[in-house]
């Protein structure tokens, strides 16, 4: 293996906070045997080079660690304060998540929820509040919502704004970016901004027709709402060639129904999503196709894989966010996505800001870079490409150390014995081992969903690749 650069990288976690641990320590433990073996078998010149690199990098490594910790503390404080303010009004303090975007206004008494997975929108208020919406008020709020861009959503995110300001003022390794200005609902439903006022009018009329006012109890609190399905009117619907399961639902199977490995043994299939393939995809995907095509080539991946990861991580919600925090389409964690992925992209580790990760192109680049590292570096010695794929998918969610622990059935987080275990098994046995021994149910479901969706996209593209 080629481990000339130091494996001080961190793990990209999209799992629960209970899974998060000191990523430096995990990967240093997991890869220490490789480094020792490499050092023992290398020339003295390499050893001297490595020592110089270690001495020069230790101070920077400590600096990045310190800034990651400061970033996390700033985020957690802002997040806790935000939830506290919401709780003063709502019994159930909903906040934005991987597949839902939530905004509060009018002193937190009016709440807007866009659910990208369930495909619905709900505007709610406490039933006893004087700030409720009649039908005219709802229509005015709907008009505002149809104009909402990702950039505006970012600017209205209290927590992200505080973290962004803290990072700019206090962190020397903070990487900022320009947030997309695409209209959220229009892009999700139609694939792009139409630029036609008549289109937005038709959307508003359609949603007003479908909207209903409901009142129900939420955690002991009476809540009134206007809600409507996030669906495209028939007259604006794209090509009917889109597969009927465009919502992206996947039936969970006990084992993969189809493998992503081609006849020549490679796991990758589609490099470029062409115009015929676009017709097989739901509109929500269309705005990200250029970035996906670009990163396939740069990081030697496939369109099917990136689509499967994004669908599982965020349901194509460009404003996806978790409390860890993780941001964007591929749920990148600023604290732990950085070391390997940003060194690969920038040449040096960086702390990634919310603004950087709410840019869909940036987000896909970092996610693709990290998967490239997992597949082609950490699990490079897993001989079978399909077995290696299962390991990399699992590691994207829970980290290489936990994958090693699963492969050795609790024998530890070192990669060398784990890879030896993987090489002694057939791919379906590796899959079963991971499914039965991964330490978190979330990662078990994650591996199943990504694998099934990878096969789904490969099936969609069949016959449309020329």
Image (cartoon, grey):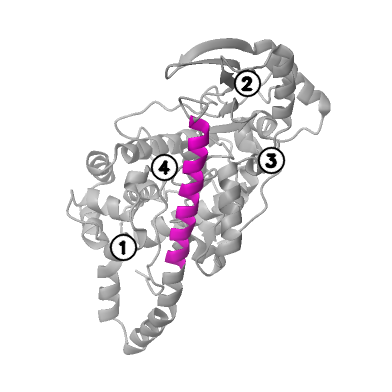
Magenta residue check for 115: no
CA distance separating discs 4 and 2: 31 Å
Q: Mark 4 sits on what residue?
A: 260
Q: Mark 2 sits on what residue?
A: 231
Verify CB contact (< 8 Å) between mark 2 and mark 3.
Answer: no
Most extreme residue toward the right is: 197
Q: Nearer the viewer, mark 3 or mark 1?
A: 3
CA distance separating discs 3 and 4: 39 Å
Q: Circle 3: is it few (<14), some (14-19), or many (20+) Cα within 10 Å? A: some
Q: Circle 4: is it few (<14), some (14-19), or many (20+) Cα within 10 Å? A: many
Which quadrant is home to the C terminus? top right
- Secondary structure beneath dot 2 equals loop
Q: Mark 3 sits on what residue?
A: 152
Above or below residue 208? Residue 114 is below
Per the rendered image, the range of residues in magenta is 64-87
- Would you say residue 98 is visible in this rendering? no
CA distance separating discs 2 and 3: 22 Å
Earlier sequence position, callout 1 versus callout 2: 1
Q: Is residue 422 left or right of residue 445?
A: left
Q: Residue at x 72, y 18 (%)?
A: 137
Q: Circle 2: is it few (<14), some (14-19), or many (20+) Cα within 10 Å? A: some
């Amino acid at each position: 293996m080629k481990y000339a650069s130091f494996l001080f990288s961190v793990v990209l976690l999209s799992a629960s906070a209970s899974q998060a641990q000191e990523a430096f320590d995990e990967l240093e433990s997991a890869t220490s045997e490789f480094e020792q073996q490499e050092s023992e078998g290398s020339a003295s010149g390499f050893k001297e080079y490595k020592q110089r690199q270690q001495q020069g990098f230790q101070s920077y490594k400590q600096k990045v660690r310190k800034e990651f910790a400061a970033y996390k503390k700033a985020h957690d404080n802002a997040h806790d304060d935000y939830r506290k303010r919401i709780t003063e009004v709502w019994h159930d303090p909903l906040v934005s998540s991987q597949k839902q975007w939530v905004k509060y206004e009018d002193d937190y008494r009016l709440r807007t929820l866009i659910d990208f997975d369930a495909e619905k929108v709900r505007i709610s208020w406490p039933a006893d509040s004087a700030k409720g919406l009649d039908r005219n008020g709802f229509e005015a709020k709907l008009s505002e919502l149809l104009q909402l861009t990702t950039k505006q959503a970012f600017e209205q995110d209290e927590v992200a704004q505080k973290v962004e300001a803290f990072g700019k003022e206090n962190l020397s390794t903070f990487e900022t970016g320009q947030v997309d200005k695409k209209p959220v609902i229009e892009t999700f439903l139609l694939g792009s901004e139409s630029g036609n006022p008549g289109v937005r009018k038709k959307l508003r009329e359609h949603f007003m027709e479908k909207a209903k006012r409901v009142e129900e109890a939420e955690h002991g609190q009476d809540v009134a709402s206007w809600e409507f399905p996030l669906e495209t009117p028939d007259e604006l619907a794209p090509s009917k060639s889109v597969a009927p399961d465009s919502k992206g639902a996947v039936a969970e199977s006990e084992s993969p129904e189809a493998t992503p490995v081609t006849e020549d043994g490679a796991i990758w299939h589609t490099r470029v999503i062409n115009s015929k393939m676009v017709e097989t995809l739901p509109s929500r995907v269309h705005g990200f196709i250029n970035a996906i095509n670009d990163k396939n080539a740069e990081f030697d991946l496939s369109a099917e894989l990136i689509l499967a990861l994004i669908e599982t991580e965020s349901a194509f919600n460009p404003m996806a966010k978790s409390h860890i925090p993780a941001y964007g389409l591929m749920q990148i964690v600023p604290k732990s996505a950085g070391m390997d992925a940003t060194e690969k992209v920038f040449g040096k580790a960086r702390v990634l800001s919310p603004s950087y990760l709410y840019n869909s192109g940036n987000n896909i680049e970092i996610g693709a870079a990290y998967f490239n590292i997992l597949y082609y570096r950490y699990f490079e010695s897993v001989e079978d490409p399909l077995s290696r794929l299962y390991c990399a998918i699992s590691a994207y969610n829970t980290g290489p150390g936990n994958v090693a622990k699963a492969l050795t059935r609790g024998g530890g987080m070192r990669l060398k014995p784990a890879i030896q275990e993987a090489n002694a098994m057939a791919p379906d046995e590796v899959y079963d081992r991971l499914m039965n021994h991964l330490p978190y149910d979330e990662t078990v479901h994650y591996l199943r969903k990504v694998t099934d969706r990878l096969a789904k996209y490969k099936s969609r593209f069949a016959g449309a690749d020329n």
